[in-house]
Amino acid sequence: MSEQEVRESTPHQSEFDGGSFTIDFLADTPSGFEFKTRNSLRRRQGKYPPGTPLPISDEQIEKVKAGMIREVATAKKKAGIAGAKPSEITPEQRTSYMDAFRASQKVGLRNVAEQGNVLSADTVFVPFPFWRNINKPEESVESLEMANFVATALILRTADNKLVVQHRSTANTLYRDIPGASVAGQFDKPKGTPVRHGTLPEITTDSIKENVIKEMEEEIGLLPQDIHDVRITGLATDKVAIHNEFLLFANAKLTAEEIERKAGENAARQNKGEYDFDEKFFVIKGDSDSIRKLLTEVKCPLPSTHTAAFVAAWYSQLLGQTTPEEAKLELKTLEEGIKRNYQEIDLIVHASHPEMRGFDPEKTPQDQGLPDILSELKRTGLVEEKDQGKEAEQMVQNAWMFDVDGVLNNPENKTNIKQEIVDQLAKRLEAGEPVVFVTGRASDWFVKWILTPLEQRISDKKMLAHFFLSAEFGNVSVFFENGELKKQVDGKNAVPQDITSEARRVTESEFSGIMSVNDAQTFFSTEIKDGVAFDRFKPRKNR
Amino acid sequence: MGTNILHEGMSKASGTAKVLDWLNKHGIKPELFSVFGDSTSDLDIGKELLRQNLNFRFVFVGEKVPDNVPFEVIQPSEKFDKGTLEYLNSLK
C-alpha cells in the first residue's frame, strides 16, 4: 500500500470503550497478535514536504524546540560529555550519547489494521518533546498525528498465580503514586538499520516484546529467562494524554516472593530520569474477581492504558476457560464497571477541586481528594491481611543514623556545621541510602542549620526521598513527599503546657546567663548557651 | 548539654522506633545500620535496634563510653563532629 492509500484507510471501531481509553484491537486467541510493519514512514509522513510548515502552532514549536534542547543536554550528561569539545569526545562516549539520544525518539503507529491474528501498521519515529507538548484531545487531529507515539504495558502473572501491580512512584512525572501495569514504558526507537533513510528500523513482534522486556529488566530486575509465553494481547488508545499502547501478557517462572527478592536487589540503586519509572510493586490474586475489584472499585486509578492491559490480560485468560461468546459478555460487564468507576473518580476530584474536570495522573491522588493506594488496597481486600500496608521490600546495603548534637557539630559551637559533614551526608543520600536523624532537638533548628545546607548541596532533589528526621524524641517527623518538605507532629506524648511554662519561667529568671530554652513543640528543653564554657556551667548544674 | 522534661517513655528509643516505622512503611530494608552517638542517651538507639533484632554498628564519638553497654562500640580517636568525619572518611 502506498502512503496515500494508507491514509485513506477506514477508521476502526474499538472493541472496548473504557471511557478514558479504548482497546482498539483485542486478541481473540490466547497466543495473541503478531505485528508487521507495513510502511516505515519518514517524519513528515509524506504529507508535509520539506520547506512546508508542520501543522503545529508557533507556541507549540517553541515548546518542542525547548524540549529538544533538554533532550540533547540530558543525553550529553548521561554520556559524560556535557561541556566537552568535539575533539575531546571518545568513540565510546559518542556511542553512549547516541544511545541516550535514541531513547528520546519514540515509535509511532499510523493506520493500524487487523487481519486474522496479525496487526499491521505504518511506523514513524516521534521525538518525545512533540508528544510531551501535544497530547490533549482538544489539539488538532493533524498535530496529534505528528505527536502520537506508542508505549508498551505488560501484565505479569507469577508462578503462584498472582498478578504484579506496580505502585508508581511519587517522583514519577507522568503517573504519580498510583497503581499500574506490572511493567510499562515508552517504545524507544530500536537499534538497527532504518528501512530507508529517515525512517525507523522494521518494527516486529519481537521488537515490541524486546522493548517491554528491557523495561522489565530496568524496573523490577527480571531477566528474559525469568518469563515465558510473552504475547501481545491488544492495542489501546489513551484518550486523555493521547497515545497508543501495546498490551502484553506474560507468565513468570518465579513466585511472587522470588520476584520481590529480585526486585529488591534491583532497586538497590538505579538513578533514573524524570520520565523513567523507579517503582515498587505489590501482588494481587490472579483470579477474575481480584482484577475486577482493581479495575472497577479502587478509587486510586490506574493509568487508563494500564487498565487496558489488565483488561486484555484478563480476557486472554478467559479465552482459555470459556467460549468466545461468554467471554465477550463478561467483557461488556467489565467495560461498564470500569467506565462507572472512572466517572465516580472524576466526580470525587471535581467535588474536591471544582476547577478540575477530572482525575489528572500527573498529580497525586491525595492532592485531588482521592484516597491513597494502600488504604484502597485495604478497603477492597485486594491484598492479604499479612501484606497490608507493605510493599515489595527494597534492600539497601546501608542506612546511616545520626544523633545531632555532638555528632554533627561540636557541643561548644553547635551551629557551626562543617561542610565536610554536609558533603558526607549528601554523598550517602545520592547513593540511594537512607540518611536519618534521631534527636531531641526541635525540627526548625535542624532544618535551618543542617537540612538547608544539605538541600543546597544535592542537585537531584529526588535523592532527598531517603531523608528522615525524627525530632523531639519521635514526636515530630520531617521528610520529603513528592519533593516537598513535610512535617508531622504527634501530640499524644506532649508534655502539658503548664509544666513547660513553669520550667521556662525558672530557666529564664535564674539561669538566663548560661542556659537558653529551645523551641520544642512537645516537651520542655533547655541547653547550655553557645560559647559558655563547661567549667562555668558545672557549679550551677550541681546546685 | 542541657535539661529536658519529657513525657514518660520518650527517649532516643522512641525516636528510633519512628524511623523504623518510616523505613518499614516504605519497604526499605537496610542490611546494616551505622549509628553515630555521643552520649548515654544515644545508646538507646542501639538498644532499640538490638530489641528489633536489626544488624548495626555503633560509633561513639563522645568523651567516654559508658560502662556496661550491651553491644560493641566503635570509638574513633577524634571526638564529636571530628570523630564522625574520621569514621566516615575511613570507609571506602
Image: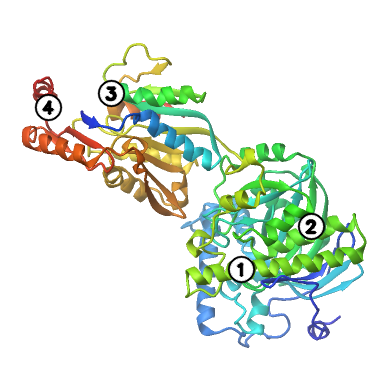
Please state the horizontal and vertical placement of residue A155, each as a whole percent of the image.
74, 54
Q: Which residue is mark 2?
A: A313
**Residue positioned 50% across, 59% down in the render:** A366
Mark 3 or 1, closer to the camera: 1
| Count of numbered labels shown in the rendering | 4
SS assignment at label 2: helix
Real-space Cα distance between discs 4 and 3?
Answer: 17 Å
Amino acid beneath label 2 = Ala
The type of residue carrying mark 4 is Ala
Q: Nearer the viewer, residue A241 or A64?
A: A241
Q: Are marks 4 and 3 in contact (CB under 8 Å)?
A: no
Question: Does residue A268 appear in the picture of this structure?
Answer: yes
Residue A494 is marked as none
Q: Which residue is mark 1?
A: A344
* Residue B79 image label: 3
Q: Secondary structure at mark 4?
A: loop
Name the side, left or right, on which B23 lies relative to A538.
right
Are discs 1 and 4 less than 8 Å apart at CB?
A: no
Question: Do dots 3 and 1 share one subunit?
Answer: no
Calculate the distance from the C-alpha at mark 1 to the C-alpha at mark 2: 24 Å
The disc placed on residue A533 is: 4
Quadrant of the image occupied by residue A395? top right
**The C terminus of chain A lies in which quarter of the figure?**
top left
